[in-house]
Amino acid sequence: MSAKYIFVTGGVVSSLGKGLAAASIGCLLEARGLRVNMMKFDPYLNVDPGTMSPFQHGEVFVTDDGAETDLDLGHYERFTHAKLSRDNNLTTGRIYEQIITKERRGDYLGKTVQVIPHVTNEIKNAAKKVAATDNVDVVLVEIGGTVGDIESLPFLEAIRQMRQELGRDNTCFVHVTLVPWIAAAQELKTKPTQHSVKEMLSIGIQPDILLCRADRDVPQEMREKIAAFCNVEQAAVIIARDVPSIYEVPLNFAEQGVDELVMKYLRLDSKPADLSKWQDIVYRSYNPKDTVEIGIVGKYVEYEDSYKSLKESLVHGALAENLKLKVTWVEASGLEVEDYASQLSGFDGILVPGGFGKRGIEGMLNAIRYARENKVPYFGICLGMQTACIEYARNVAGLQNANSGEFDPATPYRIIYKLRELTGVEEMGGTMRLGAWECVMQPDSLAAKAYGTTKISERHRHRYEFNREFEKPLTDAGLRLTGASESGTYVEIVEIPDHPFFVGCQFHPEFKSKPLEPHPLFHAFVKASYANKKA
Ligand code: GLN
């Protein structure tokens, strides 16, 4: 049997949580024993989001094969077991890059290359390629953007054609819309949803299921009205209410029978969904034994989407300990003052996440110094590991003005320098050390104990590395280099031994944490932070 498709589109406004909705449906289908895969189409012209600012686009999610992708792929991996790679995130930029390469090679010789059929064919082929992997039963395809955008038209046209080609039993259209509360009128409004469906109809797509986002319950008459005006069955008007924990979304959908509907429309058969593990996660998130407070000191903190996976990984660690997580985002440059300590004293643990560029570095160094000196659990990720090394070099090993080549090329002590394999590489797109690489840890290290093994694979995204020329002065001063790449070339983990928890890693563990499988390092960090609170 070939895979069936569920297409998830969005209307009215962006940021309705299409990604989460798609991931939650995927989760429900998996809980029914089906094999799912997931993909995202992004209508922008960048080849991938790797070169976009996190302020523009949110986090760049990295897959095992080193693709820099949309953050929705993070949701897909957290909610399902879909194996994601660069094939699972396609942008308009990438499609055009492929088509223009083919055109120059002469593949279309004699023909005029056009949006229909050439662009739409590329889109359909990409979906079919994902459908052909690992015997999947269902592929969920999320279309980025909002219906009505010029940019997303070719994608919508492609999925319209897929319904035409594959038929009703093999394709299901889920449309996410908004039912806003108008404060002045004290009323919920269905008109935006009606307009959005009308917009879909004008390009030839009749949604099968409507996921209506609302901040409160939507009365039955209103659901009936939506069903009538939008031409869907009443049971297919699903109210996706705001919920405090995103892990409740699949349960909320299941209660309203979303999976039943999908199964019915796609003529699939399976056992009922077993959601006990998700119920347990949600129960725990509403019944914590206590709170743990983590300060995240970074550069993009005004915009939470920039650190999506990171925040979720901390939540997973906290849930594993039956704790409620409180995260305080600290703008790093705000710590570049005399009494930075006062801004940090309330935290049970401090984390410096990944980042690029010079702004805020001195503030991060202050935060790390504070955590090191006051024995506050510290977790440094990528940039947070590099800055931990710089802080140690300056304030413990006495290497004044030590720095990274990224921030101060003229530093006398270049503790962190550009990856040797990148010498001479000036191009910015996809040129970092990316994706899954193995790391070997010393058996007595904190990290190895947390993982319960000495060999792991983690995902990377960096352009700079620890400079081994400084291994001796730093280790003589007490820093431990406890993890390295398999060949020993790259330093992957650093630790300070006489400290309750001081771990820096060059990789990004946040890309592999799931609510049902919390990442060992995040779990250990949250545990240590809570122990610090209790002490
Ligand atoms: N800017 C640093 C580097 O390129 C850290 C990157 C990161 O934190 N992802 O190596």
Image (cartoon, grey):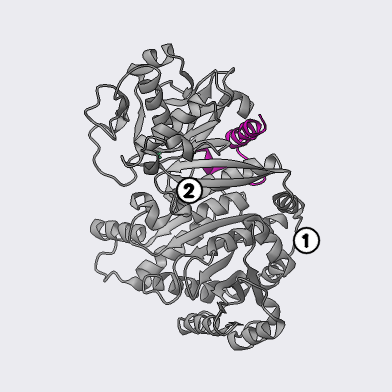
Quadrant in the picture for the N terminus: bottom right
Left or right of residue 259, residue 4 in this image: left
Left or right of residue 134, residue 301 in this image: left
Q: Is residue 506 visible?
A: no
Label 1 amino acid?
Pro
Q: In this rendering, is residue 497 above or below 31?
A: above
* Residue 156 drawn at (x, y percent): 45, 73
Which residue in the protein does label 2 denote? Answer: 307
Q: Quadrant of residue 406?
A: top left
Select label 2 or label 1 by which is in front. 2
Principal SS element in the magenta part? helix
Callouts 2 and 1 close, C-beta under 8 Å: no
| Disc 1 CB within 8 Å of nearest ligand 1 atom | no
* Residue 186 drawn at (x, y percent): 60, 82
Residue at horizontal 55%, vertical 22%? 499
Quadrant in the picture for the C terminus: top right
Residue stretch in magenta = 508-535
Residue at horizontal 38%, vertical 21%? 395
Residue at horizontal 54%, vertical 55%? 132
Q: Nearer the viewer, residue 372 or 469?
A: 372
* Residue 323 drawn at (x, y percent): 68, 43
Q: Does the segment drawn in magenta span residue 277?
A: no
Q: Which mark is first along the chain, 1 or 2?
A: 1
Q: CA distance from mark 2 to mark 1?
A: 35 Å
User: What label sits on residue 272 in the rendered view?
Assistant: 1
Q: In this rendering, is residue 316 above or below 72?
A: above
